[in-house]
Image (cartoon, rainbow, N blue to C red):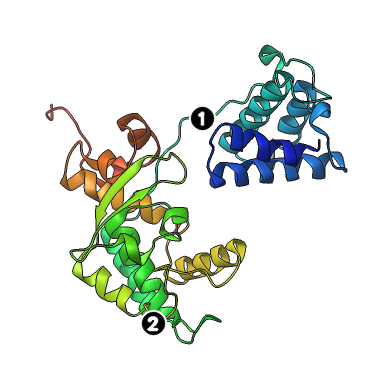
Amino acid sequence: MDLSAYAAHYVAQNDGSSGYLNQLRWTISALEKQTGRRLRIDELSVELISNYVIAERDKLSPATRRSRRNMLYRLVKAAARDRHLPDRPAIPDRDSLAHVKVPSPIPQAWSIDQVRRLLHFAEQLRGHYQSGVRKSNYWRAWIRCGWDLGWRGCDLRQLRWAWIAGDGSVVVRQQKSAKANYGRLRKDAMESLDDMRLADPVFALPMWCTLPVWRRLAQRLVASAGLPGTIGWLRHSASTNCELHNPKKGYLFAGNTPDVFYKHYFDRRLGDVVQPEEL
């Protein structure tokens, strides 16, 4: 069985999400590109995984390298114990895996004034996308919904009309964690979405292109507003603003555990720096 096919089997057996399967497929594609050929599951080994992780040191972030290393290790570990496989890889030795040092992240976010600037530039866009959606309408709705809900992009792209109650309340089962996250769209966000109703009967923020193209368009908007970072900072920004105005509750808004929220999302630089009394 080839590696990609076994990955699909592994995710299905463990009741994994489609998002996790996509992450595995991207990882396998990168590994096979490095080796120059398609791989079978019985060829996967700790040595192959380690060589890949080491070779990608200057191309991928430490966090991405560690994540991919761990996904491939879990895959080979499961395959080595899978009695239904006619050809299995050797039982892996975790201690032999290449180590990846991941520095503690420094969360970065935009201030509310910067988000307002991004919204202003989005509203100045002209023209339509292939789906017939006006560019300004789409990005205005995306920014307002992203700010009100604080969802990841993958969850916003799956936002369905059926999920949105009349008062704007909405709940999503997050693709990444499978945890439920609750939110509410304000009046301005709801009005922005009204402009999108004719675009798609199912999805409120429908995709009209591939994800890489969508990301380039989003980055172009961020750059035109003169802002640092990527459109993904919108989640960090909304979560940070929520924490500053609702202390110790920002993690609830983001749908994270407190440890994950304070480590990856909360930009303390946007709040008051805690100091002792002046000498």
Residue sticking out furthest to the right: 37
22 vs 195, left or right, is right
Of residues 264 and 151, the one nearer the viewer is: 151
State the image coordinates of residue 188 (x, y, percent, origin top left). 23, 71
The quadrant holding residue 124 is: bottom left
Relative height, residue 258 to residue 166 (above, below): above
**Which quadrant is the C terminus positioned in?**
top left
State the image coordinates of residue 70 (x, y, percent, origin top left). 62, 28
State the image coordinates of residue 218 (x, y, percent, origin top left). 50, 66
Relative height, residue 95 to residue 52 (above, below): above
Report the disc number at residue 151. none
275 vs 102, left or right, is left
Residue placed at 45% from the left, 86% from the top? Answer: 126
Residue placed at 60% from the left, 30% from the top? Answer: 66
Residue to which mark 1 is pinned:
103
Residue to which mark 2 is pinned:
124
Mark 2 surroundings: few (<14), some (14-19) or many (≥20) residues within 10 A: few
- Which of the two labelled residues, at mark 1 and mark 2, occupies the earlier sequence position? 1
**Residue 102 visible at all:** yes
Mark 1 surroundings: few (<14), some (14-19) or many (≥20) residues within 10 A: few
Relative height, residue 35 to residue 90 (above, below): below
- Residue type at mark 2 is Gln
Of residues 125 and 37, the one nearer the viewer is: 37
Of residues 68 and 86, the one nearer the viewer is: 86
In what element is the residue under mark 1?
Answer: loop
Residue placed at 67% from the left, 28% from the top? Answer: 75
Real-space CA distance between mark 1 and mark 2, rounded to the nearest whole angstrom: 39 Å
In what element is the residue under mark 2?
Answer: loop
